[in-house]
Image (cartoon, rainbow, N blue to C red):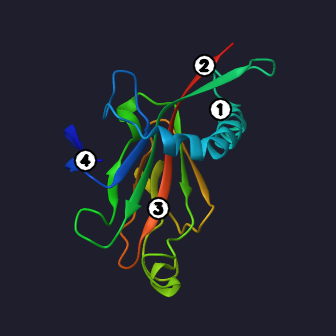
Amino acid sequence: QTVMYNGGIANVKKWKISCYLEVMDGGVPCTKPNLALLETFRPLLNSCNDLFVKWYRQQHACNRLAPRKNDQLVVKRLMTFITRYTPNPGEEALLKHVDGAGKVDGSIVVALPVDRWSAPEEVNSFEGHGGGLTFWDGKKDGFPVETHYDTRSGDLAFIDRAVWHQADPIQKGTRWALVIFYKVTRE
C-alpha cells in the first residue's frame, strides 16, 4: 500500500513498503487495512498484546505514575503493519524516527521469518547482510547512548514511548517485520 505521510516518516513522504492490518482512528495512514491478513495474524497479535502488558508493567514499575499491583492494564493496538525491506533505494531501511509522533505508549517490532521464496536462503539470511535495529535512549556524558541489536527471525523488540530508533539498512535479500503501536490505559 502506498501511503503519503504529512511531513514524512523518517523524511520519506511516500511510503510504499508496508501493508496495514489495523490503522489509527480516522483511517490514518490509510483507509483500507488488509482484514484478511489481520485475521491470519490475530493469534500472534494476541500473544504480542500479553507480552507487551508484562513488559510495560516491568518497564514502568519504578516510575512515579507506575501501574499499581492491582491495576488492570488494557492495551489497544493503534496501528499494526508489516514492512518489507529490500536493498532497493527507499526500501532498505527506516531511518531514525519516533513511533506514532508521541501518540503511542510503546511499540513492538517482530522480526518475521526470512523469505525463502524470493531468493535462496543464503541471500535472505540475517547473517552479514545488514539490518537489525538501532536505539538512541538515555545519555552518557551528555550524549545519547546508541545501542545496536542484530535481529533474527522471531526476535521481539519492545520500544518505549518516544524512543528514537531505526530499522538499519540491509544490503541483500528481503526481510519482513511486524510492527504494532500501542496505547495503554488502566482500569
Of mark 4 and mark 3, the one earlier in the sequence is: 4
Question: How far is the residue under mark 1 from the one under mark 3?
Answer: 29 Å
Circle 3: residue type: Trp
Residue in the picture at 65% in, 35% down: 56
Residue carrying label 4: 2
| Residue 31 place in picture, x, y as percent | 32, 31
The residue that disc 2 covers is: 185
Whichever of callouts 1 and 2 sits on the residue coming sooner in the sequence is 1
Amino acid on which disc 4 is placed? Thr
Q: Circles 2 and 4: CB distance less than 8 Å? A: no
- CB of mark 4 within 8 Å of CB of mark 1? no
Above or below, 182 against 165 in this view is above
Tell me the crowding category of disc 2: few under 14, some 14 to 19, or many 20 or more residues within 10 angstroms, Cα based. Answer: few
**Residue drawn 49% across the image and 35% down it:** 161
Q: Amino acid at mark 1?
A: His
Q: Quadrant of the C terminus?
A: top right
Q: CA distance from mark 1 to mark 2?
A: 13 Å
- Mark nearer the N terminus (3 vs 2): 3
Q: Quick one: SS at disc 4?
A: loop
Q: Nearer the viewer, residue 124 or 96?
A: 124
Q: Is residue 99 visible?
A: yes
Q: Nearer the viewer, mark 1 or mark 2?
A: 2
Instruction: Looking at the image, tell me whether mark 4 or mark 1 is earlier in sequence order.
Output: 4
Looking at the image, residue 11 lies above or below residue 106: below
> Closer to us: mark 2 or mark 4?
4
Element on which disc 3 rests? strand
